[in-house]
Amino acid sequence: MRSSATLALVVSILGAVSCEKKQVAAVPPATQNSGTANAATVYVAVGEKLEKPFVDRIKELDPSTVNEEVIRELDTHASEVASLLAASRIDSCDFGLPVETMDTLRPHLAKCRESIRLLRADGVRCIAQGDGGGAAQRAAAIARMSLHLYKQSECCIDLLVASAASQTASNLIEKFGSVQLPAAEKQDLLAALDALDFSKAHEPVVNDIRLTAKFVRTGDGPADYLATLEAATAQQRAEAASALEALANDLPSLWDMDHPEFRITERFDKLPPLAQRLMPAISRVRIGVRDNARLVEVAKKRLN
């Protein structure tokens, strides 16, 4: 989970916080939520099918840049879009990847981001073609994917990807402009946004802190941090681990205080140097979650 590459991804996600008209079927019925289906398998399978050059071409797509070539290319992925729309309505989403140590890999996250980018791009295509219902369906599916990812979050990077997905849904809604939304699709979208609740977003962060403390005590974690650990004395390791465990205990109250980013930064700055070197900037994680939650509220006001 935690490596130099992972921390670079955390920084890149935080730095970002700063589609001939197609007939679209009506909103699928809620009865599709039954059975033993697992949305996670669809999210990952679609992400694995998408080639990087294609994703690179569509990830910044805007209604003003949609052309016949883009439409044809997105049409080739219509079945994948339909699969994602349906999967987002499945109650169960289990990636089967519990985080047990600091270096537990999270390969599903990159695949989910690719699937979200496909939905976003197809939503942009719908806007360009005046298909408000299709655009709303895609934005709602992204919001539901965000909720799935959030419920599966066990560490900071999980949380950031889930939060960034909600930002993608909000940004897509901002592009709706004067496109008219059918009443059913609009209400479905509002329901998906209302379901987004990051009130327990501190939990994966607490888990991350505890895993870091465990690594400091046992050395069971990413190889590229072992040199830092081995250079520390036994006393420095004990002090760092104890300070991290205390922070994990206190973070839930710090998270919801007035000016939480300041409180968390203040506490983080008091950590022993060894602990600071091993943890991502928790206050920036809190800011990212806060800002994306605000974007969701703005998106809901645009729709009402």
Image: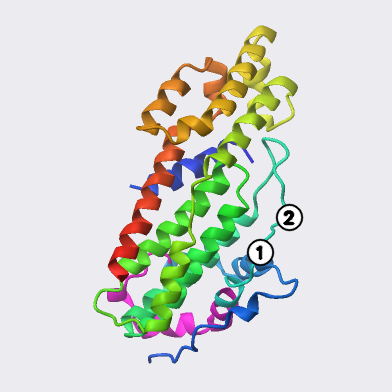
Q: Which residue is label 1 attached to?
A: 40
Q: Main secondary structure of the magenta part?
A: helix
Q: Position of residue 221 (x, y in %)?
A: 70, 31
Inspect the magenta stretch and tell me whether residue 97 lies in it: no
Residue 21, quarter of the rendered image: bottom left
Which span of residues is magenta-colored?
59-84
Q: Which residue type does callout 2 highlight?
A: Gly
User: Marks 1 and 2: in contact by CB < 8 Å?
Assistant: yes
Q: Residue at x 59, y 66 (%)?
A: 47
Alpha carbons under labels 2 and 1: distance apart = 9 Å
Q: Position of residue 214 (x, y in %)?
A: 70, 26
Above or below — where is 14 with respect to 78?
above
Q: Which residue is label 2 attached to?
A: 96
Q: Is residue 137 visible?
A: yes
Helix, strand or loop at label 1? It is helix
Above or below — where is 19 with respect to 163?
below
Viewer-proximal residue, 201 or 122? 201
78 relative position to 99: left or right: left
The C terminus lies in quadrant: bottom left
